[in-house]
Amino acid sequence: MSASISSLQQLLFELSGVLPADSSPLFAVTRQVKLHANETYIREGDKDRRLAYIEKGIMRAYTLKQNGDEATLFLRWEKQFIASHDTIIHRKPSRFVYRALEDVTLLEIDYDVLEEVMKVYPQFEPLRNFFLLRMLSESLAMMEAFVTLSPEERYRNLLAERFDVVNRVPDKYIASMLGITPVSLSRIRKRMLEKGK
Amino acid sequence: MSASISSLQQLLFELSGVLPADSSPLFAVTRQVKLHANETYIREGDKDRRLAYIEKGIMRAYTLKQNGDEATLFLRWEKQFIASHDTIIHRKPSRFVYRALEDVTLLEIDYDVLEEVMKVYPQFEPLRNFFLLRMLSESLAMMEAFVTLSPEERYRNLLAERFDVVNRVPDKYIASMLGITPVSLSRIRKRMLEKGK
DNA sequence: ATAGGAAATTAACTTTTGTTATCGCCGGAA
DNA sequence: TTCCGGCGATAACAAAAGTTAATTTCCTAT
């Protein structure tokens, strides 16, 4: 039994009182996926409606700008969910690439299969709502940072809240997630050092 | 019977096959709210877990930056959902103000009550999932715009996709939602006019 | 261990944005 | 109708970010 399943069973129990022993209809249709560092999980154009819980490692979602540069939309790490949102929300091919930044272990489910399970076992719905609310919360927090903070403030914020993650990820991805260029992030770091932290 | 209820009943039927006549347990706990232009719907510090469907008008969600300026997080208009996300997601007092930009008609439900209804009538769950996915979709689209587009491109984008809404809303709110100042938006408009649109 | 390549820093220059202030315009209130 | 206040445009300057390119550092694969 994977550690992810135990965590999620525990979460399901807390959310809805479903005992781990009664959760097999759900976890029977999940599967563990292992990715090497740099391995692509979802490609541009993929249609699979993949939803996954990250057991270990960091994932990055990015798309290509008109000029060909990559734009990192977000990073996700241990105990977070990652979902092919174009396919799940709009049923259209993914415009995003999801790739492992480190060796990654996922617990994966197909969203179509999840829907079928939910129809038969609505007592699992709180888990789906949990995942949706979590994704929504993270997105809104990022939006809020964009409208209320300067790039430097966003970077300080990220350092304060996710220092461990920032340190595991190349700066250029951090920069792009902050909406700036790597050159600009480097200058921000310099300014922060000069002005006594 | 309000137009909103009919729309939502129709939506519920499409999503899950529930007939309008069978949806009364849900719509019995909704209520219509009318707001005058400029009236505040949710105040900073409010704890109510309000979820609403906009029948008519435009709503604006904003928060105060450290410097005291308002930062508009998003606008929502007809046929969209608006939710006090701090209270619903985190059960903490709202850091945001939700205010009507025009005369607004809402169909409102308390999220706690919604949860109770869903426990008893899980056949309504697809409607909750729809609303969550919609909010998520809009948030992700905005995040994507911030990491892939320049302020000018974001403005062009907004004009192309929501010209009607942009024209109903004071520029300063548009600017703040784009993450820039009103002065900067004014310059962008000027550049766009000069450079042959 | 070393060589090659990617990532980060730095520099020089351009462009854009922020900031502050002024001005004109329009619309609501007295 | 007139007055006032908010909103948008504009100007001038400072600050920050984009762009391109060169250099250094670091990591990885051989």
Image (spheres, coloured by chain):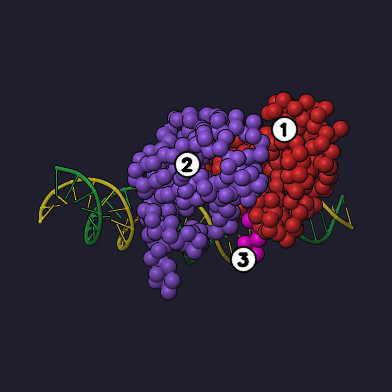
Chain colours: A red, B purple, C green, D yellow
Label for residue B107? 2
Q: Nearer the viewer, mark 2 or mark 3?
A: 2
Q: Amino acid at mark 1?
A: Gln
In this rendering, position of residue C5 left or right of residue B78: right
In this rendering, position of residue A7 left or right of residue A179: right
* Dot 3 crowding, Cα within 10 Å, few <14, some 14–19, many 20+: few
Answer yes or no: is residue A180 visible. no
Give how far across and how far down residue A164 sits, in percent: 68, 37
Answer yes or no: is residue B1 visible. yes
Q: Amino acid at mark 3?
A: Asn
Quarter of the image holding residue A47? Answer: bottom right
In this rendering, position of residue C4 left or right of residue B51: right
Q: Nearer the viewer, mark 3 or mark 1?
A: 1
Give how far across and how far down residue B135 sits, in percent: 57, 46
- The residue located at (34%, 45%) in the rendering is B37
Which residue occupies the foreground of this view, B44 or D8?
A: B44
Q: Which residues are magenta?
A: A64-72
> Tag 3, which secondary structure?
loop
Report the Cα–Cα distance between label 2 and label 3.
Answer: 44 Å
- The residue located at (39%, 59%) in the rendering is B167
Label for residue A67? 3
Quarter of the image holding residue A165? Answer: top right
